[in-house]
Amino acid sequence: MLLKELLGKDFVNFRKNDYFENLQFRKVCCDVEKVQNGDLYFCLTHNDEKALTRCEKALEKGAAAVVSDLSLPIWKAVQVADVRGTFARACANFYQHACDDLKIVGITGTNGKTTTSHVVAEMLKRNGRKVGVIGTNGVFYDGKKFDCPLTTPDADFLHKTFLDMKNAGMEYVVMEVSAHAIDQKRIDGIKFELGVLTNVTQDHLDYFDNLQNYEATKLSFFTPDHIKKGVVCADDESARKLLEKCDVPLVSYGLCSPSDAFAIDVCCTINGSRFTANICDDVVEIRTNLIGNYNVENSLAALCVCQSLGLGGEELARGLNYINPVEGRFNVINFSGKHVVIDFAHSPDGLMNVLKTARGLTDKKLFVVFGCGGNRDKGKRPQMGAIAEKFADYVCLTDDNPRLECSQDIISDIEKGMKKPHFIESDRSKAIVKMINLAKHGDIVLIAGKGAEKYQEIGTEKHPYNDFDVVYQHFKDLNPERKTGREKYDC
């Protein structure tokens, strides 16, 4: 493919010579460390000094040309007006616009993206549809699983994945859409069949500065440029703004507010939830392994999506009933009569939801182990400390990807919101073992923050680590003759 064909209307040939007119390249790339001979490198930074350094490095590694939105003193540099949007559209062009041949569902929201995407995909697959998934837990399609570099990856990874999925016969793609991805235009050029908004609560303010910017970014997904139709939670204050004014048709769902889809007779236990769902007048009886009211809402969102994609009442029930738990999302492990719950909750609202759910599932004691990520939104740390001590009987503060921050500094920030006695054990494995050993029969031990993550970020390195592994290893240490496994949490 020629450069001018790839860039289309974004192409600005300001040096008018045969090199750019006739330039062909091997592939597109935005990571200078991965540039190979003949690649077209897109420099996404707006910092002149960094851009110059990266572009020079890309050319040294053999890049055919570099593209940026800066005027660089490099003769093989092409300047465009908006490099991030151009890169996303160029990737769609390079990978044959495979996204146009797939029905893509994009799910955004502070909490619930992974669970809702998993449920939608499973519902479609149970009804004979061929589905791929892209999100926090990885890329899944055709029986394969791959790691995903980001919740919503960069456009080159994303569109290559679309093409691979199309070639494997997938009809649908269900993907998580992060606020970062919307802001950085990674999804430009994709027309989503449906967009879903689960909720907007505080998170990522290290990037967005304030909740207003974060909310505005989430809501900007709900325009005709991005989606054909929307599914939004009427119980969420931000989503209700869309219900008041939006340029695409919307379907609403909720437990507390008037909505197109709702649930009655909700009953949640440690083994799952049951309820009667009315989905735009399709009434279905649901029995699901997903636990808690917030998962009833996630289930309603999935039901709305699948109905909008053409599934009827019997298909909706078949798709959702007794669905497998989502790895790292309120997974319950029976530990010799104690219940250990592993959940990804890492925001104030997420932690409150899982703690309130756990609190309602036992009349015994509730323990929680959690920390906060380093080099991320510091404002949420004391909030999470206050929430933890409000709902749990025992709190242990520990590490959760401290990155470049001092572990004790992060824990001290969490403690600013706490008034009650609590435990501190920065070694996460030791913290988990301590709380399990303190718990008695019938108690619940909630391990929050990492979910299915397979690493602990310390400094600039990712060290192998997993909450499930720690729990199972401790069980084996205490019960060397008994066997245990993780099969029910496999995706």
Image (spheres, rainbow, N blue to C red):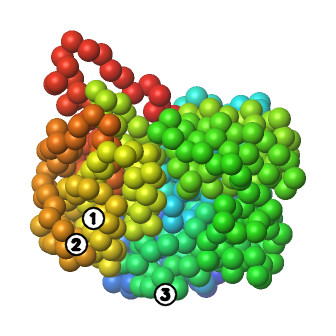
Eye-nearest disc, 3 or 1: 1
Tell me whether the residue at label 3 lies in contact with that at label 2, contact meaning CB atoms closer than 8 angstroms: no
Element under disc 1: helix
Disc 1 + disc 2, Cβ < 8 Å: yes
- Looking at this view, is 334 or 350 the one in front? 334
Left or right: where 345 falls relative to 25: left
Q: Which residue is mark 3?
A: 71
Quarter of the image where one finds residue 404: bottom left
Q: Which residue sits at x=61%, y=63%?
A: 198
**Which residue extends farthest top?**
481
Q: Which residue is mark 1?
A: 389
Residue 288 visible from this viewpoint:
yes
Looking at the image, which residue is at 21% across and 12% down?
A: 481
Q: Which label's residue is closer to the chain start, 3 or 1? A: 3
Kindly identify which residue carries mark 2.
418
Mark 3 or mark 2: whose residue is earlier in sequence: 3
Q: Residue at x 28, y 27 (%)?
A: 336
Q: Amino acid at mark 3?
A: Ser
